[in-house]
Every structure is written in structure tokens, then in C-alpha cells.
Amino acid sequence: MDSSLFHISDFIRQLIETTQSIIKFDIFVVDENLCRIVGTGKYEKYEGLTLPKGGTTAYVLATGKPLILNNPKEHEICKSCPVTKLCFEENSIIYPIIKHGKTIGVISIGAFDDKMKERQHRMEKELILFLKNIANFISSKLVEKENSERIKTILNTVNEGLIVTDNKGKIILYNNIMEKIFYTVIKQDLYIGDIIPIPNISDMIDEKKVYDNVELNLGNNFDQKRLYVTVKPIQGENDNSEILFSFRDQKEMGSIAYKLLGDNCHLNFNLDSIVGVSDSIKKAKGDAVIAAKSDFNVLIRGESGTGKEIFARAVHNNSNRNKNSFIAINCAAIPENLLESELFGYEDGAFTGAKKGGKPGKFELANNGTIFLDEIGDLALHLQPKLLRVIECGEIERVGGTKPIKLNVRVIAATNRNLEKMIEDGEFREDLYYRLNVMPLDIPPLRNRIEDISVLVKYFISVYNGKYGKNIKDVSEEAKKTFLMYNWPGNVRELQNAIEYSVNVEKSDIIQYESVSTKIKNQFENGKQMWKNKNIKEIEIDTIRRLLIEYGDDMEGKRKIAEDMGISLTTLYRRLKQL
């Protein structure tokens, strides 16, 4: 029988993979059945195996007490373990996962050589605290999931659309009718205003007042839809409040989600608003959450069009600096001879044409906030030492100035270039690279997260329905195949443009193949015979078959397939069972 932890294994995997990238120790999690449900590094290949009942993990599971093993094979408990001779750990820290006073699992980290063992000894107190916090996080997530499922069962008995949010509008619960009403995918943790086009929704959330039967008109003059929204605050414990939104008496409705995307929507972008369901985008969002909660520098890597600035703004908006400025500058867009004064400012008379009285640079404008240095790989080599000095010393000098100016600025940089190769070629300073790359954040290309394409298509349809007064409900099967087969060199930005075009030219309420842009159709036609008469699921299975031939069906090959498709190994194994 599957354990409770097994049902949140995707969440646990994302959590421990992110943690492993920070602490640099491999981690595994065992459930109450002693089944290793998730592991990183050396532990990954043992996922699904059951540990012996006489071992140290079983001891922690039975006692609910943490255990530190400095020399595992010499420990008293290990002497009775049937697999002691097979144990490869030189050092281990094992911590219980406890829910409502009952131990429901174990989380453990291991060291496999003397160097790792020495580092684990040195960091022992910090690692124990780390494991404690992760165990508590897993436990609280499980409690939250169980409570949500119980309440959602109740919500689904109600014959109207219901959404419950926290006091900031983040979705906690919703019932199944909501997705049928709005023809969109609704997810927990998204901001309700990014899903439902309710006028003045931010005021409704902030004021925490009751609104009864607010009329919501959707569509256009030729196809008007109407429903009524009731908003009720729910006061909880410890001053925590939630908000209940109910939608009733609805007729057929379209969407005016374009109102959600005003010209300045990106200014208030948050992590909850980033659309995607693939494991790779979840991993990127998980890393961004960690980055937002810290204050170290971040280097965002990703191809053009993947949304690097959106992630940068989201990290800032979710950080402690969100009350202060976010200043963005593109290092490739400004002429090299002007970039220094743009970054650091200049004094009166610094050069011909200088503004009287001088001018502050982007770093000064970002003081106590965040500066986003886009296309950092294009920063001129002679400016790199000056940027390094700002990061290391926390001060700048204006062009033409002699007095240092103290600043407190967080740096988030982004690039689509291979900085490591640039370092080898002498085009980028290695010391600057390390100061920027404290927290790496990789944004996957769209072609590697095929699961997100359908979700993004639906999202952009809702956006452009409003802009063009349309009521597009879906895309045809052939159009879906076309979007899924295209390799999207321009990533999400290109997909957004493609959907805008299709919504604009489509005459029916379903985007047909004929309404897809010629460039995308041409690529589809080249491979059409291979995919003819297949549905989306069959296309995915064929993709797996093709990649098995390319990479092989051993463990390393499967890892590469999962990485290419933007899914976890667990998800891949589920797909393989369908072959």
C-alpha cells in the first residue's frame, strides 16, 4: 500500500534536489514502510527498494530520534544489520519526519569519502538544523495536502464555482466546477487575479470586506456572458485570514484575461504567476523560492525568450527587498562607451555633454533594492573589474568622481552565453563569474518541457481572447500536434506570438490547423507522415521510443531522456509502463 509520503513524492523530490544543490550532500527519504521513495546522487538508483528492518534507518523510524553515525559500520545498531557489508556511507545523519506525534518517515544525508566525511563533521550542527527544517516542511506539506483534500471533497458537493485564497490572493483550494466555468487550468499557489478577471480584485483582497453578487461581464458585444461573484473573508487563527470567492448563475462565458496582462504586468510578477507544470519548470521555481528567501547574488541562465527577466523580477518581488527598487539594464543594448556612466553615474563636467549637476547611475537607483544585469556576458572586459569592486566592496565611484559612494544592492545577472567558455577564451573574468554565480538558476528551454506547451497555449488563448474580442475555447488536435512538434527556438516568447497570431486570424471557437503560422506548419509538414493519425499521448510515447534509441535504455540513458523531456525519472518510468 502506498504511504502518505509517496503521494507527495514529486514535492519531496523537488525539495531535496534543491537542497542537495546547496549543501552538496546526497539525500534520501524513506517512508513508514522503509521504502526509499526519493534519493539524489548515489541514492537515486536505489529508489523503490526497501531497507532492512534491523538497520539504522529502521531504528530512527521506530524511536523518532535523530541518529548521527560517524563510523556507520562500527556502530552497535549496524552490527545487527543484514546489509552492513554493502554499506557505502562513511558518515550519516538520519532525521525523523514526524506528523501529529507519529514518525512517518526518515530523511538522511550521507558522506562517501574522507573529504565529505570531514566536511560533514565540520557542518554537523548546521546540517542537523537543515534536516530538521526539511522534515518539518515535508510534514506540514502533508498535513496541508490532507486537509485540502478533505475540504475539496466538501467543496465539490457544492453546485457553484468556489475558490479559497490566502489573505494575499494566493489560491489554496478550488472545486472542479471552476475549471469548467473558465475553460482554464487552475492550480494551487497561483494568484487568483492571474486566473479570474475580476475588476478591482486587489482592492477586494486588501479591504477584506464582504462583496455580494458583484456582476462580472465577460466576452464582447456579440457574445456577452455574465455571472455573479461573492467575496467573503474568513478569519482564522493567529490573525491568519482566508478569502472565499463563489461564482454562480453563470451562462456560457468567455474570457477577458487580457485585463490581467496590462503593459506593466511584469512589474508585479511573482513566482506563483509563472505558468508551467513540468518538473523542470517546477525545479526552476523551487530554486527561485530559495533565491528569494536569501540575499545572495543570482546568475540566471537560459536561452532567449525563456523568461529570465520574469524570474528575476519574481525573485525580487518575493524577497525582503520588494519594497525597494528593481532596476533592469541590458548590458548588450547600450553602447560600450556609455555603459559605464549608465551603471555608475557621472559627476558634473565628467565629459562633454554631461548633465549639469551629474546623474546617478543604475546602481544608485537600485540602492537597498535589486539591480538586474541582463546579457551580462556582453559586458565589456574593461568594465568587469569595476563591477567586481561594487560586488566585493559595496561601493561605486561615479565617472569623473573621486569619492566612493556606499551602496546596498543585490545583483541578479542573466545570460544566454557560455560564460565558462568565455573564461577559457579570456573574455570574461573568472573571479566575477564566481561572485555572480553564488546561486545559479537555470531556466529550461520550451522544447525540453513539452508538458508546459499545452498549459501555455490555454493561458495565452485566454489572454488574447480579450484583446481581440474572441471566444476561442481550445485548439484542434492537428493544431496541438503542430505546437508540440515545433522546437520553439524563440521559447515562450515565440509561443506567445504564435498564439496571438492564431487567435487573431481564427474565425471559429477552435484554433484550426489553418490558423497556425506558416513557419510552424512547415516544420510540422516535414514530419507529418511520422506522426499522422496519432493523438498527443501517442506522440509523447513515440518521443520516448525515439530517445531510447538515441540514448539507450540503461540508467544513464533514462536520465538523459527525462532531462530532455523535462520530466522526473519517476514520471518517465510511469510512461515506460505504457510502451
Image (cartoon, helix red, strand yellow):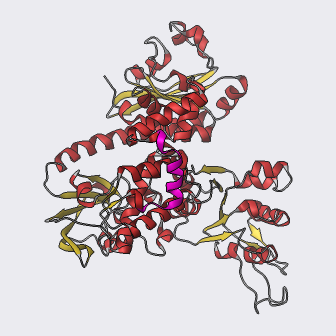
Q: Position of residue 512 (x, y in %)?
A: 37, 58
Which of the image's four quarters has the C terminus?
top left
516 within the magenta span:
yes
Instruction: Please determine whether, in this image, residue 516 is positioned above or below residue 362.
Output: above
Task: Work out whether residue 533 or residue 217 is closer to the camera in this orientation and state it.
Answer: 533
Q: Is residue 12 visible?
A: yes
165 within the magenta span:
no
Q: Quadrant of residue 307?
A: bottom right
Q: Residue at x 44, y 55 (%)?
A: 275
Extreme bottom residue here?
356
Q: Quadrant of residue 499?
A: bottom left
Q: How many marks?
A: 0
Task: Work out whether residue 128 or residue 275 is closer to the camera in this orientation and state it.
Answer: 275
Q: Position of residue 319 (x, y in %)?
A: 53, 60
Which of the image's four quarters has the N terminus?
top left
- Give the residues drawn in magenta, as a range: 515-530
Q: Position of residue 210 (x, y in %)?
A: 20, 70
Q: Quadrant of residue 123?
A: top right
Q: Residue at x 48, y 14 (%)?
A: 55
Q: Is residue 132 visible?
A: no
Q: Residue at x 21, y 57 (%)?
A: 162
Secondary structure mostly seen in the magenta stretch:
helix
Instruction: Please determine whether, in this image, residue 54 is positioned above or below residue 231.
Output: above
